Amino acid sequence: MNIDSIQGAALLLVRIVDEVPADDDVTAGTAGAIMFGLLVLATALLMVSFMKQMRKTERAQQAGVFGDDLPEKERVTSVDQSNDDTPAAPTQ
């Protein structure tokens, strides 16, 4: 027996044994409905948490926690992340 005849016989056997279900028989079922509901609930909770954090951030900004109202000379505009202790050459 060669490989093609074995594959052909296996394919024929699968077609005979495996029946195609009717459209009404294929559903997500209870587990799918529960999972969908949990995903909707998780999304809603994340949105509520996000809005809560945004309101808290807005109140903190209005209170000046982030330093937006500092004078220009006290603001830090950039951070030098080099590891060496040599001063940077002035630019012209």
Image (tube, grey):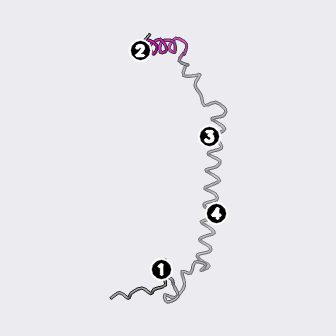
11 lies above or below 40: above
Between 73 and 48, the residue placed more toward the observer is 73
Whether residues under marks 3 and 2 lie with C-beta atoms below 8 angstroms apart, the answer is: no
Query: In the image, which is nearer the foreground, mark 4 or mark 2?
Result: 2
| Residue at 59% in and 65% down | 54
Residue 36 is tagged as 3
| Amino acid found under the numbered disc labelled 2 | Asp
Sequence-wise, which precedes: disc 4 or disc 1?
A: 4
Foreground pick, 11 / 43: 11
Residue 78 highlighted magenta (yes or no): no
Which residue type does callout 3 highlight?
Answer: Phe
- Disc 4 residue type? Lys
| Residue matched to label 1 | 80
Residue at (35% x, 87% y) in the render: 91
Label 1: state its secondary structure.
loop
Dot 1 or dot 2: first in sequence order is: 2
Alpha-carbon span between mark 3 and mark 2: 44 Å
What's the distance in space between the residues labelled 1 and 2, CA to CA?
A: 69 Å
Residue 23 on image: x %, y %: 54, 22
Residue 58 pos. (x, y %): 59, 71
